[in-house]
Image: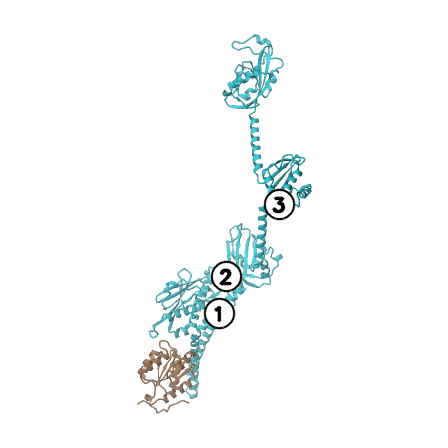
Chain colours: A brown, B cyan
């Protein structure tokens, strides 16, 4: 069972940015994370994802690769160029080609997951990603 | 009527101013006889004065009898001859001959009262009576006879001319088989020198002459003569003979009424050659017709089969006996559709019919044929040529299938995304619900919502898969059915949506709420739309420069009433920069592609063109706004211009 200690200050909890162009998929991920007490923000494409990262400084970004406007891979590259502290990035995709390309691109992401995503696994990845982060001052 | 003075008593009473008429001797026939004689009888005295003339003079010369008594004879002659006449008379009078027929050597003319001249024959005789000389002349109008003679001469001249100039050689034999006449053509046909033949020669002698000239095909002239005479004994009226120099002569022999006969010789070498050539070419034609893979038939005016080649027998399964007289509609049931019937009930066919029809074999099997029907010039026969295109149909289906599969392959990437999306949602909603149940956090409302979500996503998935299945299904036949173009366009967009979204292309669909149905094959139309969407996408992608500089490209699919009444217009427009003017007229050509080597097959637009035109519609391209636009015009099912409803009807049976 996934749970965090209830006396943790929610404001200090790391936040997760969920990026996917499909609101239904976003919604399920957000629900799942919310159920284990993780707060989330959402974005629908790469460009707004970059803005959200800058604004909210999430600890983890869950991002679909295939999106209109700026896709996931390019968003990651863009973020890397910005020179700021990179959040942990979990890429998702339903497309085997994108999966393969992302794996080979040495993007330095935390994980690349194939859709359809089993939520339990996703949440485990998120928790692991959060856990591996040093607490911010 | 003047009297001939027979008795001398009247001589004694001379009339004042007139000399007494001469006494007529006994040998002169009586008045009555003279009056009835047809010829003109004139008695003149030694001074050539007319003393008596008979009634015939009225008919012949136009004078009354009494008018001429006392006139000089020369009044009856033309002026120019009068002087000469006196000379003749003097000579005659002094000569020893008592009678003379004038005009023995030249034509004598008489002159009528009205001045007209006519040819005459005159017999004159000289007599003595009581010391006086007088002359009797019998005059005959020979104009009729002269005319007949000149006609005969003319006729005989013409006949002679004809005889010499006729195409045939001719020989005329009299009774006893002796030569009467021959023409030059006969000589030249047989190669005889002029002078070889003489009238009076016997037939045998002529045969010998010809044989000696070497014209008979035989071992020796003597043998030729024997052969000819032997064959001639039986008198074949018509015959053929071949000369040594290669001519073929046709001989006609006809008996003459008086016992002779005429033989006519005609050179038929060329004719025979032409006939042989005709026979050969007919045989060749027959062989070609027999060898042909197509069924070739001729029909009479009632469209019943007169002749059929062997391919017809193998194609349809009927024997020659059955085919003879069979109506063409037994083999091709829909043939009647192509006939024109006028108000009198006369049936004809427009000059050339070329179409795909369905034919029926003897065992009842229906199979597709490509038919050409043409009417012979006299319009009494029709020629039907039919080719079995079953195999062609199969190949066409396979090609269409291959084309669809290749399109499917292109769509695969977008497909994966399209299918995964609902699957992902379903998976996650199920997971969430399970997790919540584990935690005891699942209330009925939440579970209901989650299950509904899963259900709707499953339905979405099923629809996509169904679209795919329909698209990929092999079409068994080309039978047109009613379909709704907006449904087909929507299905096409649905299949392509994934791909287009990935390429960052918006799809705008604009369909009227009530779109009429069209007769055609729905999934083929769907394929056309997919083809157009693919082309639009490719154009947009190619036209994009810097990927960072992404503008919102879009493809617009619109259905609206067409410019012409009753038509429907379906258009697919893009923002891909348009079609260069130079290739605008080539884009529907098969294998034309503007893509680089290995990328485009170039088949898509030409197949689309084929599908739309087969539906009786039109497809065209134009540049429109920031890109190109392909416009399809279709006719709703009531207004189909081609007559293929019959085919659909039959299939329904």
Q: Nearer the viewer, residue B399 or B255?
A: B255
Mark 2 vs mark 3: which is more N-terminal?
Answer: 3
Q: Secondary structure at mark 1?
A: helix
Looking at the picture, how far across and down is residue A124, in whole percent?
Answer: 40, 87
Please identify the quarter of the rendering in which residue A112 is found: bottom left
Quadrant of image for the C terminus of chain B:
bottom right
Q: CA distance from mark 3 to mark 1?
A: 73 Å
Chain hosting mark 1? B
Q: Which residue is mark 2?
A: B645
Labels 1 and 2 in the same subunit: yes
- Vertical comparison of B294 with A40: above or below: above
Please identify the quarter of the rendering in which residue B106 is found: top right
Q: Can see residue B55?
A: yes
Labels 3 and 1 in the same subunit: yes
Looking at the picture, how far across and down is residue A106, in whole percent?
Answer: 38, 82
Q: Any mark on residue B244, and which?
A: 3
Q: Residue furthest top?
A: B12
Q: Any mark on residue B102, and which?
A: none
- Quick one: label 3, few (<14), some, or many (20+) residues within 10 Å? few
Mark 3 vs mark 1: which is more N-terminal?
Answer: 3
Q: Can see residue B304?
A: no
């Amino acid at each position: 069972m996934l749970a965090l200690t209830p006396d943790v200050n929610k404001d200090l909890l790391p936040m997760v940015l969920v990026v996917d162009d499909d609101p239904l998929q976003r919604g399920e991920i957000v629900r799942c994370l919310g159920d284990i007490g993780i707060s989330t923000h959402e974005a629908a494409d790469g460009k707004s994802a970059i803005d959200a990262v800058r604004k909210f400084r999430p600890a983890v970004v869950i991002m679909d690769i295939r999106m209109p406007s700026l896709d996931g891979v390019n968003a990651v590259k863009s973020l890397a160029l910005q020179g700021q502290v990179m959040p942990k990035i979990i890429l998702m995709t339903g497309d085997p080609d994108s999966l393969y390309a992302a794996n080979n691109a040495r993007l330095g992401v935390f994980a690349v997951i194939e859709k359809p995503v089993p939520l339990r696994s996703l949440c485990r990845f998120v928790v692991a990603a959060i856990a591996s982060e040093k607490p911010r001052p | 009527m003047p009297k001939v003075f027979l008795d001398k008593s009247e001589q004694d009473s001379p009339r004042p101013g007139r000399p007494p008429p001469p006494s007529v001797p006994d040998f002169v026939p009586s008045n009555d006889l003279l009056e009835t004689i047809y010829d003109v009888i004139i008695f003149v005295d030694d001074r050539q004065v007319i003393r008596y003339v008979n009634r015939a003079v009225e008919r012949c010369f136009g004078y009354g009898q009494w008018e001429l008594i006392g006139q000089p004879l020369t009044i009856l002659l033309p002026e120019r001859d009068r002087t000469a006449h006196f000379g003749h008379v003097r000579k005659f009078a002094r000569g020893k001959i008592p009678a003379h027929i004038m005009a023995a050597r030249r034509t004598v003319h008489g002159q009528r009262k009205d001045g007209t001249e006519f040819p005459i024959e005159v017999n004159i005789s000289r007599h003595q009576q009581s010391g006086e000389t007088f002359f009797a002349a019998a005059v005959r109008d020979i104009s009729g006879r002269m005319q007949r003679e000149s006609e005969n001469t003319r006729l005989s001249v013409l006949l002679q001319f004809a005889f010499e100039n006729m195409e045939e050689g001719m020989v005329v034999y009299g009774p006893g088989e002796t030569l009467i006449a021959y023409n030059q053509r006969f000589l030249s046909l047989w190669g005889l020198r002029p002078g070889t033949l003489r009238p009076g020669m016997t037939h045998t002698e002529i045969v010998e002459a010809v044989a000696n000239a070497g014209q008979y095909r035989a071992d020796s002239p003597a043998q030729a003569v024997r052969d000819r005479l032997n064959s001639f004994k039986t008198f074949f009226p018509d015959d053929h003979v071949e000369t040594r120099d290669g001519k073929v002569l046709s001989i006609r022999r006809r008996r003459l009424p008086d016992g002779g006969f005429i033989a006519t010789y005609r050179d038929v070498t060329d004719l025979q050659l032409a006939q042989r050539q005709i026979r050969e070419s007919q045989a060749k034609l027959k062989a070609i017709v027999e060898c042909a893979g197509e069924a070739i038939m001729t029909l009479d005016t009632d469209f019943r089969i007169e002749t059929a080649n062997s391919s017809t027998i193998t194609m349809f399964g009927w024997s020659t006996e059955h085919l003879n007289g069979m109506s063409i509609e037994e083999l091709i049931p829909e043939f009647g559709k192509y006939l024109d019937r006028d108000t009198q009930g006369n049936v004809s066919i427009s000059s050339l019919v070329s179409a795909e029809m369905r034919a029926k074999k003897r065992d009842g099997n229906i199979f597709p044929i490509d038919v050409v029907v043409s009417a012979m010039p006299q319009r009494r026969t029709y020629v039907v040529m039919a080719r079995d295109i079953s195999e062609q149909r199969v190949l066409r289906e396979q090609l269409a299938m291959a084309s669809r599969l290749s399109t499917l392959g292109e769509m695969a990437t977008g497909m994966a995304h399209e299918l995964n999306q609902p699957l992902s949602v379903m998976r996650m909603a199920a997971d969430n619900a399970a997790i919540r149940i584990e935690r005891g956090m699942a209330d009925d409302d939440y579970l209901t919502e989650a299950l509904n979500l899963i259900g709707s996503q499953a339905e979405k998935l099923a629809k996509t898969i169904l679209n795919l299945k329909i698209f990929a299904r092999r079409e068994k036949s080309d039978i047109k059915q009613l379909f709704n173009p907006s449904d087909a366009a929507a299905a096409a967009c649905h299949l392509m949506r994934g791909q287009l979204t990935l390429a960052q292309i918006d799809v705008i669909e604009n369909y009227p709420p009530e779109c009429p149905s069209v007769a055609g094959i729905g999934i083929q139309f769907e394929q056309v739309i997919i083809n157009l969407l693919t082309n639009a996408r490719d154009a947009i992608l190619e036209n994009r420069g810097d990927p960072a500089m992404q503008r919102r490209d879009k493809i617009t699919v619109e259905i609206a009433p067409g410019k012409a009444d009753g038509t429907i217009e379906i258009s697919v427009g893009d923002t891909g920069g348009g079609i260069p003017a130079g290739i605008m007229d080539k884009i529907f050509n098969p294998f034309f592609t503007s893509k680089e080597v290995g990328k485009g097959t170039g088949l898509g637009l030409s197949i689309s063109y084929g599908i739309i035109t087969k539906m009786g519609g039109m497809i065209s391209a134009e540049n429109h706004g920031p890109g190109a636009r392909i416009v399809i015009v279709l006719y709703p099912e009531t207004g189909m211009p081609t007559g293929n409803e019959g085919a659909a009807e039959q299939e329904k049976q």
